[in-house]
């Protein structure tokens, strides 16, 4: 089985998107399949047209000159299509596997039809919903409706649709796609790649002013939908009665400046530590400083439909966390067993849940064990990637034999 993957971007860039991709590719290769990988111009300019990263070879697309909205997307599609067709003719894959956004699906559909190659499309989130969070459009706007229509056009024309969770699967089926044409490849973790949480690095703790403190924290990208403003609001309501409580925010992103300004307004800036982005190899050292993680995502279409990776990664490391009860979290987290859920958007509910968790640390060992077992037995990449087999086999039966 030879599979040509079409990607928005890849490692060495770091994001949940690139980590999921790398895990899928490695597990597919473990099944004996040959995988090839082309990235869109959104990877950015690279030193070479082909790069080897962590044992995986990525073919890069040319980056076209930027243009106004509409023209820019058309140029991205054409550049991806040109590189994809060149590689498809050379590599002769059995399947072209496009990954969201739809800017990758359109070139895949066009090339697949020209060359007679089956095309599958994997949706990790809808492009229109991501644009709402990024502030480039609003739900129900003309651009939103046009983008949604484009996604629907694509999923009705590919040979099969993959997606990451039940929320997205239901949305796809509601657009008129037969249930038999949609398969869920659940988010998962490479359990062997995560060690159970270790002892805190005392030197790092001292450097950050966290010695002798109880630490609430978050590690990742600071997007608006993550709800880190709610965490700061909750902390502001808690810290007066718990003077040794602190917040550690590791990472960066679009909301970095807004969060720092919010901490200033709340009068807690001296008790909230912003580390900025840290090297991926160092992330576990910062995780080890956090007593209780928080994933307070706001409720919106994106978070209600899409399952994140972070709670699964936390379970794999034996971390303790609270999370909002958005649909994407409820699909992953067993409340009171592998983590705790609170009413999304409600600061008092978050405060109550955090306080309850801090007051009952005797429950933490059982939660750690349950979370680790969940990812070991259920949400691992071997189980998830196995769901590709039947579809690939039906589309390319000779190669699957």
Image (spheres, rainbow, N blue to C red):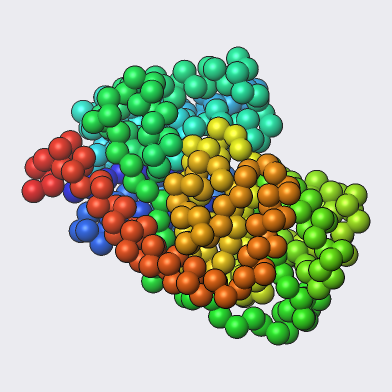
Residue at image coords 64%, 81%:
200
Residue 67 visible in image: yes
**How far from the left and from the top, in percent, is residue 127?**
52, 31
**How far from the left and from the top, in percent, is residue 273?**
78, 65
In the image shown, does 163 or 49 lie closer to the viewer? Answer: 163
**How far from the left and from the top, in percent, is residue 218?**
65, 60
Seen in the picture, residue 304 relative to 18 is either above or below; the reply is above
Residue at image coords 68%, 49%:
349
In the image shown, does 9 or 189 lie closer to the viewer? Answer: 189
Residue 147 left/right relative to 288: left
Residue at image coords 45%, 65%:
371
Seen in the picture, residue 95 relative to 359 is either above or below; the reply is above
Residue at image coords 29%, 38%:
183
Residue 361: quadrant of the picture: bottom right
Residue 232 left/right relative to 192: right
Residue 123 visible in image: no
**How far from the left and from the top, in percent, is residue 344?**
63, 43
Give the tally of numbered discs.
0
In the image shown, does 167 or 369 lie closer to the viewer? Answer: 369
Residue 304 left/right relative to 253: left
Residue 163 left/right relative to 238: left
In the image shown, does 128 or 39 lie closer to the viewer? Answer: 128
């Amino acid at each position: 089985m030879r599979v040509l993957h079409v990607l928005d971007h890849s490692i060495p860039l770091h994001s949940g998107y690139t980590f999921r991709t790398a895990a899928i590719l490695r597990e597919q290769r473990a099944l004996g399949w040959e995988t090839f990988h082309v990235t869109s111009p959104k990877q950015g300019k690279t030193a070479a047209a082909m790069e080897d990263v962590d044992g995986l070879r990525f073919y890069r697309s040319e980056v076209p000159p930027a243009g106004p909205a509409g023209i820019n997307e058309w140029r991205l599609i054409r550049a991806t299509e040109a590189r994809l067709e060149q590689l498809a003719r050379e590599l002769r894959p059995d399947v072209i596997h496009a990954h969201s956004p739809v800017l990758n699906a359109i070139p895949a559909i066009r090339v697949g039809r020209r060359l007679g190659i089956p095309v599958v499309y994997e949706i990790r989130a809808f492009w229109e919903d991501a644009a709402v969070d990024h502030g480039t459009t609003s739900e129900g706007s003309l651009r939103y409706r046009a983008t949604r229509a484009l996604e629907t056009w694509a999923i009705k024309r590919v040979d099969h649709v993959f997606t990451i969770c039940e929320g997205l699967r239901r949305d796809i089926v509601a657009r008129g796609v037969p249930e038999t044409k949609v398969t869920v490849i659940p988010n998962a973790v490479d359990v062997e790649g995560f060690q159970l949480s270790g002892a805190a690095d005392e030197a790092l703790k001292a450097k950050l002013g966290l010695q002798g403190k109880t630490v609430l924290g978050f590690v990742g990208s600071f997007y608006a939908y993550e709800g880190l403003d709610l965490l700061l609001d909750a902390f502001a309501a808690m810290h007066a009665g718990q003077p040794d409580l602190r917040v550690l925010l590791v990472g960066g992103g679009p909301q970095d400046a807004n969060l720092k300004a919010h901490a200033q307004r709340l009068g807690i800036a001296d008790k909230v530590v912003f580390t900025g982005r840290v090297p991926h190899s160092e992330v576990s050292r910062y995780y080890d400083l956090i007593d209780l993680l928080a994933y307070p995502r706001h409720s919106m279409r994106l978070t209600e439909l899409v399952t994140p990776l972070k709670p699964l990664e936390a379970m794999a490391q034996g971390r303790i966390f609270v999370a909002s009860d958005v649909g994407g979290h409820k699909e992953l987290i067993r409340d009171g067993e592998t983590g705790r859920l609170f009413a999304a958007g409600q600061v008092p509910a978050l405060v109550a849940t955090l306080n309850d968790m801090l007051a009952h640390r005797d429950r933490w060992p059982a939660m750690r064990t349950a979370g680790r077992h969940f990812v070991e037995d259920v949400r691992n990449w071997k189980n998830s990637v196995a769901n590709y087999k039947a579809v690939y086999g039906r589309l390319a039966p000779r190669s699957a034999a």
